[in-house]
Amino acid sequence: MLAAYLIKVTLHRIALSTIPELQHKILRLLNLIYHRQIIKKMEEKEKDKSRRKFLLDFSALGLGSLVASSLLTESCNKIGPGPGKKITLLNSKNELVEVDSLYISTLNKNLSPTHNSEGRKGLPGKKFVLVVDLAKCKNARKCMDKCASVHQLRPDQFHLNVLVMKDSEEAAPYFFPKHCQHCDNPPCVKVCPVDATFKRSDGIVLIDNERCIGCRFCIAACPYSARSFNWFEPKDAEKYKDVPYNIELNVPQKKGTVTKCSFSADCLREGKLPYCVSACPNEVYYFGNVYEDTVTNGTTGETVSFSDLIAKNAGYRLMEELGTAPSIYYLPPKDRAKMPEKDDLNI
Amino acid sequence: MADLYRKEEQVKKELLRELYTDLTRPLAGYSRSGKIWIGFLLLLIAVGTIMYVRQLKIGLGVTDMRDIASWGLYISDFVFFVAVSLVGSLISAILKLSNINWATPLTRIAEIIAVAALFSALAIIVVDMGRPDRLLNIFVYGRLQSPIVWDIIVVNSYLVISLLLLYLPLIPDIALLRKNMGHKPRWQQRMYKILSVGWQGTEEQFKILNLSITSLMILIVPVALSIHTVTSWLFASTLRPGWDSTLFGPYFVAGAFMVGAAAVVIVMYIVRGQYKYQEYITNYHFDMMGKLLVLTSLIYLYFNINEYLVPAYKMKSAEGEHILGLFVGDYSLMFWFVQLCGMLVPILLMIFKPFRKPKPLMIIAVFIVIGAFFKRYLIVVPTQLHPFLPIQNYPASYHHYSPTFSECSITLGGIAFVALVITLFIKFFPIIPIWETAHEKGISNETINN
C-alpha cells in the first residue's frame, strides 16, 4: 500500500512539473484554432447583418479569449448594451479588432460563491503569471501598502517586500519587489505535514489558516523568505472577529498560523487584477494567464503577449538553479527609472 | 556431597540477599538532599509550565523567533533530546548484539535516559507549535510527503520499543520487589503486582523473555538510526545553505551517539557516588565508557571536518557566508567552544588513561553534553539568519536571534523533566539490573525464585 502511495506521490510530482508545460503548449495550439474560428464566424455574421446575439461563453473564454483585455481588467463591465456600438479590443496576437458591443456580454462579478473548499481547486483553464519590470520600479511602495492593508498585516509582516538588490560589490543596485514565487515545484507545499499550504491547478500556492498547525516548516523551507507568521494576535483582530474566513484572501489572519502572498486569488476569481498589480503607479507589473499568453499591465491596462514580453526583454526567473520553477518573471533592470539611493536601503 | 551442594547454595543465597539489599537501597526512601533535588526540579518544571501557559495566551511572540529565524531554541532542544535518546539503542542493543557484555549494568541507565529524553522531545515539539490545539490535524490531514510525518512515525515507534526494552528486562526484578516490598504503601505494592505480570521465573518464562528482548534489540537498531536521520532531514530536505547537505543523516547519528554516551557517563557517576555502587559500576566501566566516547567522538570529528571544511574550501556564495559567520562571525565564539571544548580537547584528553577515571571522565562528559547542546543551536539558528535574499525593511532585531526568558525557562523545564523522570525511576526500580547481575555472578534462576 505504501509503495502504491509513493508511486502516486511521485507521479503527482512529475505531473506537477511537466503538465503545465504540456498543457501550455496544447492550449496555445487550441487557442490559435479557436481564435481563428471565432473571427471567421464574426465576419460571416457581420456580412449577414443578422443581429442574433452572440453570447460569449465564459467557460470557453478560459480556453481562448477573444476579449483578452476585458478578461482581467474591468473594462467589460462598463460596456452598455446599446447596439451598433463598436468596441476596439486587443487580442492575444497583439492585433486590434473591432467588435460590436452586442457580441460582448458583461462579466458576472459573482461567478460562484467562494466556498473555501472551492478555493482549494483553482480557476479552471488558468495558469497565472506575474511579470515584474525591474527597470520601472521607483520604490513607490504603493503595492506594499495596498497588500498590507487588505491582508491585515502588521508593519513587520510582508506578503510583498520591495528590496534593494545588489548582486555584488561592483554591481549596480536596483529595486526588487519580492512576492511569493508561486513555484510549480514548491518546497513549502512538499514539507507541510497537514496539507494546509497547497498548490492549485491555476498555479497559485495558498495557505489554509484554519488547518495550519504553526510548525513553520514551510518558512524554513522557502528559499525566498516569502512567508510570514502570526507571532501575536493579528492586527485589528477585534475588528475582523466576525468576518468569515476567506481562504483566497487569507483574512481574517489567525494567531499561531502562517500567512503568505496569495496572488490575490480573491480578485482573480472576480476577474480583477491582483491588489499590488493595480496599485502600482509606475507600470511595473504585468499579470495574466499563461494559457492565453496574455499579460495586462496594472497601471496602463495595456494587454500584451506574455511570450513576446519575455522574449524581447530577456525575462528571467529568480534562482532558476534551485529548480523551484517560479510563476514570476523579472525583466532585467536596464535603464532604470530610478536608481536606489542610500535612503532607500532599509536594513 | 549433598552437604557441599547445600553449602554452596547457602553462599549463593547470601550473595543474592546482599545483591538485593545493595541494589534496592535507592528505594528505601528520600534523603534530605534527595528531597531538595526533587523540589528543585519540580520548581524548574513549574516555572517552565507557567511560561508556557503565558506563551499560549500571548502567542509564540513571547520568544525571540520571528519571520527570519522562525525556528529557535525549541527546535534545538528537540534535536538535542532526540540525540540524547539514541544512546539507549547503542548501549542496550548495539553493544549487546555484538556480544560486548561489560555494559550490562549500564543498560537500564541508558534506557531510562532514552525514554526520559524522548518524553521531553515530544513535549518540546508541541511547545514549538503555533497551534497546539490542532495537533490532531496531523492524523486527520497527515501527508506522507512531509518529513515531519516521518519523524512522528519513527520517534513514536522508537519510544514504544525503548519503553519495552526498559520494561521487559525489568519484569524479573519487579517480581522480586513484589515479594520483598511488603512495607511499602499499598498503591506501590499494587503497581509492582500489576507490572510483574505474574512472573514466576520459570525456564519457559525466561526463554520467552530473552527471545523478546533479543528481537527488540534487533528491531531498535534501524528505528534508532532512522529517528535521528529523519530528524536531520527536517533540515537537509530544504534548499537553505548550511542545511542543504547530503551528509546530515550520518552526521547527526554520530553526534547523537557521542552526546548520549556522555549523558550515560554523567548519570552513572552520580548513581555510583550517591548509592555507593563502586562495586557494580567500577573504574573499568568508566574506562570502557571513556574508550567508547573516544570512538564516537572521533567519528563525529570526521563528519565535522567533512561538513565544515569542504564547503569552506569551495566558499560558494551563500554557503560561504554561513561558514564565515560560524568561523569568524557572530557565532564564532560559540562555534569554537563547541568544536574545541565539546569535541577536540575531550578526544585528546580521553586518549590517556588517567582521564578515563570516573571523576575526570565525568567532567569531560559534562563539557561534551554542553557542547552538544550548543552544537544543535548552531545547526538550527545561523542558517536561517543567512537567507538567499537580503533581510530588509524588518526591524533591526530580526537580524539576530537570542532566546528570551520564556524560551530558556521552558528549555530548563524540559531538562529538569528528564532529570526528574530518571530520579523517580531510580526511587521506584533498581537502576542496576538485579537478575542480570545475579546471573553474571553465577546465581541460578532457582535460587532467585526462592
Image (cartoon, helix red, strand yellow):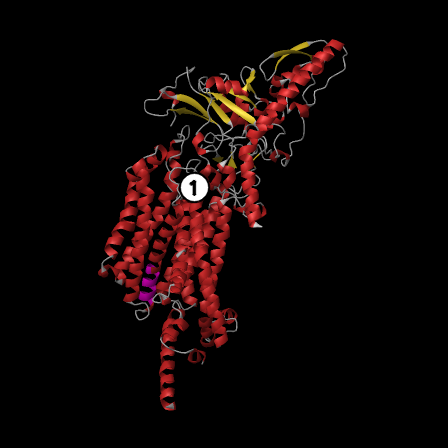
Q: Residue at x 28, y 42 (%)?
A: B333
- Inspect the magenta stretch and tell me whether residue B283 lies in it: no
Q: Quadrant of the C terminus of chain B?
A: bottom left
Q: Is residue A92 left or right of residue B399?
A: right
In the image, residue B222 sits, relative to residue A155, either above or below, namely: below
- Horizontal and vertical percent position of residue B55: 47, 44
Q: Residue at x 35, y 83 (%)?
A: B11
Report the number of numbered marks: 1
Start and end of the magenta stretch? B265-274
Task: Note whether residue B135 is visible.
Answer: yes
Judging from the image, mark 1 belongs to the subunit labelled B
**Residue A248, horizontal then vertical, whole percent:** 59, 31
Residue B304: x percent and y percent? Answer: 32, 46
Say left or right for B194 vs A29: left
Residue at screen point 47% across, 68% down: B211
- Find disc 1 in the rendering and name its residue: B71
